[in-house]
Image: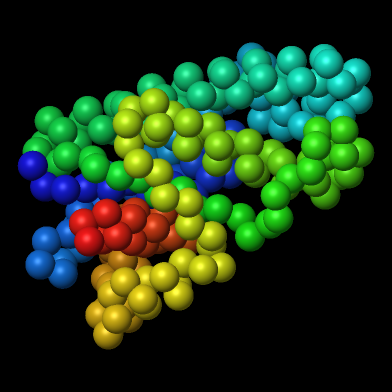
Amino acid sequence: MKRTAIGVRMHSGWGALVAVSSTDGSVEIVGRRRIDLISGGAAAAKQPYHYARNLELSEAEKVLANCFESSRSLAFAAVKDVVDALRSRQYGVICSAVIQASSRPLPPLPKILGSHALIHTAEGEFFRAVFRRACEELELPVTGIRERELNERVDTAFGKAASRIRQQISAFGRTLGPPWTQDQKTAALAGLLALVEKQK
């Protein structure tokens, strides 16, 4: 089995997932997909904190917990499907990476619900936490990588090869076709970094 990692860059309700492997310094993109973490029928699913802000605190907590469980279940199924499909092709997923925001730790829920800016921050963190939980349940180690620190960590991990690695990842858009946006490039780089750090 070729050692493989998955990286993801999350958005509200969905994420861009890329599976990456590396042999002798050569990067291989072995899978990519959009993972959807909300079901169509739930009014609160895409923006749970926006939905909860006008509720009583106890009801808000209940809504957020229910949304988290629903999204976690979808994330678990999606990640397991990716891992199983790769295993059938002799790629063994050994770790994962999630791109983190650069924000500070969130305050208690009442403060979050009282601030529109914090509501947006909390929703970003919500879906990253969903992905992290799904990976943990699948016994996949998860590395959180702050987006603003990604390039510095790549430089540290790859040294003089860092620039070549970035060019390789960027160029995959020509061979793989769309989508190969900043989402996929960042997810691939994060996954590769987690893989290299895991193998050290």
The spot of residue 199 in percent (x, y) is: 21, 57
Residue 24 in view in this figure: yes
* Snapshot colouring: rainbow
Residue at screen point 77% across, 32% down: 49
Work out whether residue 35 or residue 193 is closer to the camera in this orientation and state it: 193
**Image spot of residue 94 (x, y percent):** 24, 42
Whether residue 192 is visible = no
Q: Nearer the viewer, residue 65 or 9?
A: 65
List the single residue furthest toward the bottom: 160
Residue at image x 53%, y 32%? 130
Which quadrant of the view contains residue 135? top left
Nearest the eye: 11 or 2: 2
In the rendered image, residue 45, in percent from the top left (x then y), is placed at 66, 24
From the viewer's perspective, is 37 left or right of 189?
A: right
Looking at the image, residue 14 lies above or below residue 155: above
**Residue 82 x %, y %:** 29, 33
